[in-house]
Amino acid sequence: MSIEDDAVEVRTQGWRTLAALHGLIEAELERALQASARLSVVEYTVLDALGRQDGWHMRMQQLAHATALSASATTRLVNRLEERGLLTRVLCLDDRRGIYTELTAAGQDLLTDARPTHDATLERALSDARSVPELAPLVDALPGLLASAV
């Protein structure tokens, strides 16, 4: 095996490890959020992204980027959350083609109620992952990644 082949294998194994950690965390969050708040992980992510905005609104394309969804998947998700009364859409006054998505009061309340479950589940899932030898180095690296991003 050449050095280049070794580099590809290291990247591939790193990706598999990252995917395994993501899958473990997402499965735990999905179970906990469904049980406590009737929210999927991606629905929680939308509410959380909007809740972190000053004024609680974002353009649809910003929301798609924040949730790592396609534009059409974001539209379907926003439609579902709007039907539940958790979001509303508002036309942009500066650009009539632009549409903002905002949290409603009910959406903010649900986010506030769901956040402790999300945070505790995430902490527990990361702690559990730390006990898996293949995942522990990645879990331990997370705080450093966050610090360097700030």
Image: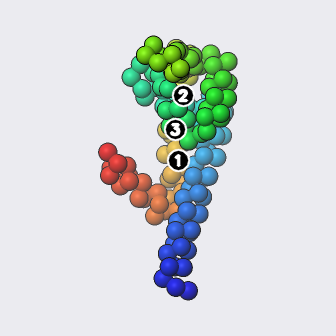
SS of the residue under disc 1: helix
Quote the CA–CA distance across marks 1 and 2.
Answer: 32 Å
Report the quarter where the N terminus lies: bottom right
Q: Nearer the viewer, mark 1 or mark 2?
A: 2
Residue 116, image x, y percentages: 50, 32
Badge 1: how crowded within 10 Å, few (<14), some, or many (20+)? some
Quote the CA–CA distance across marks 3 and 2.
Answer: 9 Å
SS of the residue under disc 3: helix
Q: Which residue is mark 1?
A: 124
For the point 50% across and 53% down, which residue is it? 127
Q: Which residue is mark 2?
A: 60
Report the quarter where the C terminus lies: top left
Residue 41, image x, y percentages: 60, 37
Q: Is residue 96 above or below residue 133?
A: above
Q: Nearer the viewer, residue 98 or 148?
A: 98
Amino acid bearing label 3: His
Color style of the picture = rainbow
Amino acid bearing label 1: Arg
For the point 48% across and 82% down, which residue is it? 3
**Earlier sequence position, callout 1 versus callout 2:** 2
The answer to whether residue 129 of the structure is visible from this angle is yes
Quote the CA–CA distance across marks 3 and 1.
Answer: 27 Å
Res. 31 image quadrant? top right
SS of the residue under disc 2: helix
Q: Nearer the viewer, mark 3 or mark 1?
A: 3
Q: Report the side of 20 relative to 59 (left or right).
A: right
**Earlier sequence position, callout 3 versus callout 2:** 2
Q: Is residue 6 above or below residue 23?
A: below
Amino acid bearing label 2: Met
